[in-house]
Image (tube, helix red, strand yellow):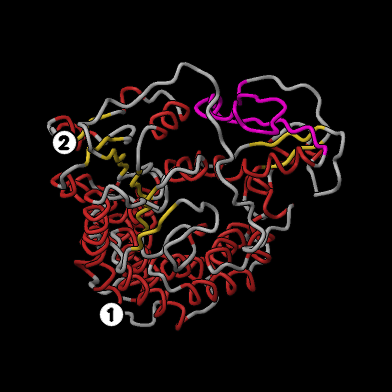
Amino acid sequence: MIDIEMDIEMDIEMDIERALACYDARQYDRAVAICQTLLAEQPQRLDALNLLAGIAFQQREWSQAIAYYQTLLRQYPRFATGYANLGRTWQEIDSLPAAKAAYQQALALDDSGTQWWFSLGHIHWDLGEIEAAIACFEAVLARDPQWHEARSTLSLLRLLQGDFQRGFAAYEARPSRRDLTETFPRGDLIWQGESLRGKTLLLLAEQGFGDAIQFVRYVPELAAEGVRVWLRVRPPLLRLFQGLPGCDRLFSTDDPIPAWDAHALLMSLPYLRQTTPETIPAKVPYLHLSPHCRPHVPEAPTGYKKVGLVWSGSPTHRKDRDRSCSWSEFQPWLDLPQIQFYSLQKPPRPEEAEAIAAEPRLIDLAPQLRDFWDTAAMIQDLDLVITVDTAVAHLAGAFGKPAWVVLAQTPDWRWGLQGDRSAWYPTLRLFRQSRRGQWTDVMTTIGECLAQWGSDPLSAAS
């Protein structure tokens, strides 16, 4: 009898190994069949339940994954990894309070899970619980000081709080800066902030278009100190930056570059220049249109004010779900009198394109926007831009144009946590969401301000 029981146990262990092999080979149906057979014989097998939940997660069958994890945890309430996996699943479907509770339970059982601290930190950040998020990323770094992504994420939270000294210093741990010695020729020429009078500094634009537009503001300062400034950017920014004061030469990312003396990433300039909230170089405009044949927006009816709209950003941005709206959120404003609306949305999302084309009160400018120079030229003709947190907000601010920026409850670091003004752009007015995911209140407020501004010929948008 003993030998028979041992044989059965060995067969079961071989079955779970086969199921794991099928999982690794993405043969999910076979793995599920093996696990279900095992559970028919032993309903409380943790490994089979956990694997079924993992398969459902990989297949994006979220409710099924959650059900499996909850069944597992009812039977094994001290299984920390199960709580963490449940938290990750809730996080995928943006059920952040449930995800937070699951991760907290996992860490209460086993606080050594560095990845769990990291994930919980992001959840606190998304929920606007900044101090709790900071504590989580500090816990990560206490366990793994070389986790650079945790350090650079912590830096963004410091910057959001206005702690520029610690924030910009820690932001130098971001991957693009840390790997510069390996990813760019002559990694030994990285500028450390020393005097470069009479020498050539090559500035490399990184990350988003808005980041480049924001931080080229330092170029005139450097040029005034006797630095020969060269700038390398992606092609959609080339014509825009041709009018940048102090820029000696401009290169595309595809161009060969002659010898230079030192180079730096644009987003390292606030750190290298020791910028504080009080010393932000905020004089605008710092961009000017170069003398190309300039396009103009179509004329509005006599006496109408002209307002440009942007309601969504890049869908690949990590926080796009928070920062972008749908077209329907902006649409009620079109009933306001004495205002002609123009879409600067490029490109409109496929599901919204038909509605935009059918809207008689909105003129779609997207077909005329080849690059950011074209967008800037159009903005010059407008009285006001209303935009979510995208490059267009930075573009309007850099040209000193009035813009109203619609912000998520927990915005990007550069907008800070409170106030209706930007330290970086004096002509921008900030409208903040009061509750995550809910745009109704802030859109109603903007609509009221827009109605008052549109009906008063003397009122200023800024």
Disc 1 designates what residue? 75
Q: Residues within 10 Å of mark 2 (few under 14, many from 20)?
A: some
Nearest to the observer: residue 54 or residue 421 = 421
Name the amino acid, label 2.
Arg
Q: Is residue 338 above or below residue 107?
A: above
Under circle 1, the secondary element is: helix
Residue 100: say if magenta.
Answer: no
Q: Residues within 10 Å of mark 1 (few under 14, many from 20)?
A: few
Residue 176 seen by the camera:
yes
| Residue found farthest to the front | 458
Q: CA distance from mark 2 to mark 1?
A: 60 Å
Disc 2 designates what residue? 361
Residue 250: say if magenta.
Answer: yes
Under circle 2, the secondary element is: loop
Please report the bounds of the magenta region as a residue range.
Answer: 226-254
Name the amino acid, label 1.
Gln
Q: Residue 119, how many percent across, how many down?
A: 46, 65
Q: Is residue 365 above or below residue 306?
A: above
Q: At x 34% / y 56%, what residue is drawn?
A: 322
Compared across the picture, whether 309 is left or right of 139 comes to left
Nearest to the observer: residue 134 or residue 435 = 435
**Residue 162: quadrant of the picture:** bottom right
Residue 36 seen by the camera:
no
The mark lying in front, picked from 2 and 1, is 2
Q: At x 67% / y 31%, what residue is drawn?
A: 231
Q: Residue 6, how many percent across, how many down?
A: 37, 70
First-in-chain label (2 vs 1):
1
Q: Residue 381, how many percent across, how many down?
A: 37, 32
Compared across the picture, whether 424 is left or right of 201 comes to left
Q: Quadrant of the N terminus?
A: bottom left
Compared across the picture, whether 373 is left or right of 266 comes to left
